[in-house]
Amino acid sequence: MASSNLSVATWNINSVRLRMPIVGRFLTEQAPDILCLQEIKCQEHQFPYEAFRALGYEHFAVHGQKGYHGVATVGRVPFHEFSRHDWQDNGEARHVGIELEGPGQGTVIENVYIPAGGDEPDRAINPKFGQKLDFLGRMTRWAETVDRPTLIVGDFNVAPLESDVWNHKALLKVVSHTPIEVETLQGFMDAHGWQDIGRQHRSAPERYYSWWSYRSKDWKAGDRGRRLDHMWASPELAAQSVAHHVHEDCRDWEKPSDHVPLVTEFDL
């Protein structure tokens, strides 16, 4: 069987309609085969399909809702929608899965937007934090049943490693890097034996961030980043990843998202 290359990108875009100009620039410059977007913030009929088609992306799986959340996967290679899981258990649009039909046929790509979890890392006083942990719990039970080559990507809203944040000690009590979130995410990893592709290519303790707050006037000088975005794969698929890129330059573009895109290349 001939091998073929496949590139997959993930990006929390923080409103796809508002940021279509930089999405277009990214697709023109990098041309990934598949782009998984989170936080599209629009309903399915409002998604900018024509703008993507004009760039050569003609395949879509869009799970949207009004004003908040929402995920979309677009491709210049064929796929069909495979799954929609309500891991939030309240109808929010936070997941869509596809199955590839061309290169990598049969491979599943799951696109997920895990809740941020509010400000206080205590479910007794902050229900949003409990919802985040419960979301991860439902994902974990699902992961135990995964039986085919799968890539799960998106905004996990957890920076698990010490070198995934700008200051480990300062962030131990800050939602996204608390011990209970890290432990819960590890449980999800163990449930399927997911491989962390980013850290396969950029070994800890190398600095690796994908998000910088809008509150920081000069994000580069402060560099108070966190790695909230992830690309994890089934072991056999992870072994086929040949390159991984973090496009930090996109954080400097016109009207940027606070997240930057990640791209993994596979030799299938």
Image (cartoon, rainbow, N blue to C red):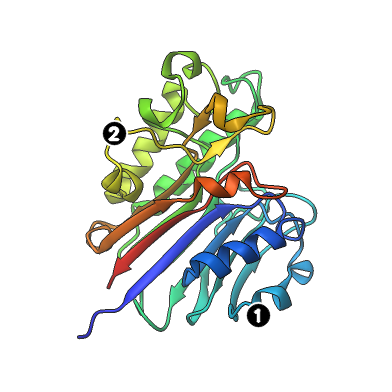
Position of 26 with respect to 170 (left or right) is right
Mark 2 neighbour density, 10 Å: few (under 14) some (14–19) many (20 or more): some
In the image: residue 195, left or right of residue 157: left
Label 2 SS = loop
Amino acid under disc 1 = Arg
In the image, what residue occupies the spot 53% across and 53% down? 112
Question: Marks 2 and 1, how far apart in space?
Answer: 39 Å
Give residue 185's position: percent from left, percent from top: 40, 37
Nearer to us in this view, 115 or 219: 219
Q: Mark 2 is on which residue type?
A: Ala
Depicted 154 relative to depicted 220: above or below: below
Is 124 displayed left or right of 194 in the figure? right
The image quadrant that residue 18 belongs to is bottom right
| Residue 88 percent location from the top left of the image | 60, 46
In terms of depth relative to the viewer, which is nearer, 100 or 85? Answer: 100
Q: Is residue 208 above or below residue 75?
A: above
Specify which label sits upstream in the sequence, 2 or 1.
1
Residue 35, given in percent of the width and then of the height, sits at 53, 65
- Residue pointed to by mark 2: 204
At horizontal 31% and vertical 66% (from top left) the residue drawn is 266
Name the residue carrying label 1: 53
Residue 96 in sight from this viewpoint: no
* Drawn side of residue 237 relative to residue 79, left or right: left
Q: In which quarter of the image is residue 151?
A: bottom left
